[in-house]
Image (cartoon, helix red, strand yellow):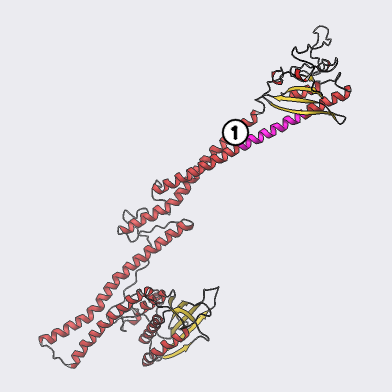
Amino acid sequence: MTPDAGPDSEPEPRPAPVSGSGLSGAGADGAARSGKGTGRGAGPLGRRLFAAFAVVALASIALLTAAALVGTERGIGTARQADRQRVADRVAAAAADAYRRAAGWEGADLGPARTIALGAEAVLTVRDADGHMLLSPGGHGGGPGTGQGRGQMHGTNRDGTGDTPDSADPATGAETSAAPDPGAGQGPSATPDPSAGQGPGTSSGRAVTADIRADGRTVGSVHLGFPAASGTEGRDIAWGWIAVAALAALALALAVSWYVTRRLTGPVVRVAHTARAIAAGDRAARSRVDAPGELGELSRAFDTMADDVTRAEGARRRLAADVAHELRTPLAALQAGLEELRDGYAEPAPERLAALHDQTLRLGRIVGDLAKLSAAESARLSLHRTTLDLTELVRGAVRDREPELRAAGLTVRTRPAAGPLPVHADGDRLHQALGNLLSNTARYCRPGDTVTVTARAEPRKGAGDGVVVIEVADDGPGIPAAELPYVFDRLWRGSVARDVGGSGIGLAVVKELVTAHGGTVEASSGPEGGTVITVRLPAAPPGAVRN
């Protein structure tokens, strides 16, 4: 089998697929470069995308910064409060040791407890179990009996260098009793304001308390007040690092947003640039964007579409030229014969009239083939699908074309499938496509050649994706490998079939009809010469009712 060929013209060479290497014109100036953006700026779309990314980045960083500040503040506050409570527990433990050594508050040495409080920059107040003041923030105390002042006599200096009395005679070094606070009393009501003492700082109300326990019972309590500025250094350091991290994250987010924006908009701008170049008449312009994901697919699909458009435009030009040539030959013969009859140069003999009649038949055949092609192109809109058995359809088509095949001196063999092959298709259209294949075989094969028609099913790879196959194979002259990609093009005539009549439309009709059914058709050379035309169609679901 060979593609349709006509006797009056040499086959035209097929144009090579457009590679886009010869870009020219203002529109394609940037399209020959690599797949990067064509302009310096990102364009309106790029600016909008960058603004959207920047807003998202700002909102995210602001939210994370606020969360970090709140979390840091709470963490530092919790840790600071835990440290203060541990200091209070230590002070209470020191006071309990003093209580046990003195067997009571009378004569108890509260100096170690006061030293611990001073080391934590806290204002210390000690009370007994009844609430009486034992140690005031100013270092004075009032307690039961005569020991109210002796509890303060063994305090530690502010620098913690040693045990020295709260008050001593500079000359003799003898201990002297500290004067009681004028406002201090002997009961709970006489407790001075903890924040008004003369300790290391002024209490801010951030106070902690701890019970003094000795021998399994509570014998008093300690109260520590801490200044407002206590522990702010850690908070300032944490806030500074958070601010630096937020600024760095913002700069990084803006840089990444700009990069992503350029990567997203660059291919789109480039494709639009190439589209304008093609619209301006540069059919060689291609985008050639090397981008990942959907953007790369968009560029490749656009370039493929541009190749198809260029190829279709060339095919339309060739179609017009071929149709004009096919019509010009019989029209010229008709015109010359009629002029001879009109001018009396030839008699209207039956032979002369028969020759003119043959030319009209040739014209009618060309017009009919063009009408068939037009109908095949619109077959997708006019298919009347039913579920039918492809095996019976193949037998019927071979039976109808068998006289034509035997008249051409061909041997016909049919290899139907062992069982039914259900397909959901238009039986008349498939019958027409298979008839065209058999007629094409009868036209181009040599007498004595064999034609084999096979119907079979390909194994299913999954549910609902079965395929049925029709093969029309012959051992005729075959088709050169270089011409196989073009055998289904309109008006394409093979180089080995120049002496065979035909319009070059039969196989194009087959392709249109098979494609309308969602199938594929391809031509290949047989293993021992000849040609094999393979048609694949989607199979109907198993158990479908056949008409």
Q: Position of residue 306 (x, y in %)?
A: 37, 62
Q: Residue at x 42, y 45 (%)?
A: 47
Residue closest to the eye, 303 or 158: 158
Give the crowd class for mark 1: few <14, some 14-19, many >=20 residues within 10 Å. Answer: some
Residue 281's place in the image compared with 467, above or below, is above
- Residue 353 appears left or right of 91: left
184 drawn magenta: no
Q: Quadrant of residue 370?
A: bottom left
Total numbered badges shown on the rendered structure: 1
Q: Position of residue 474 (x, y in %)?
A: 43, 85
Residue closest to the eye, 171 or 439: 171
Q: Residue furthest top?
A: 171
Span shown in magenta: 70-88
- Tell me the residue that label 1 is attached to: 239
Q: Quadrant of residue 91?
A: top right
Answer whether residue 32 is visible to the viewer in this image.
no
Q: Residue at x 22, y 78 (%)?
A: 328
77 drawn magenta: yes
- Residue 537 appears left or right of 201: left
Residue 130's place in the image compared with 493, above or below, is above
Disc 1 is placed on an element classified as helix
Q: Indicate the amino acid at tag 1.
A: Trp
Q: Residue at x 55, y 73 (%)?
A: 463
Residue closest to the eye, 109 or 157: 109
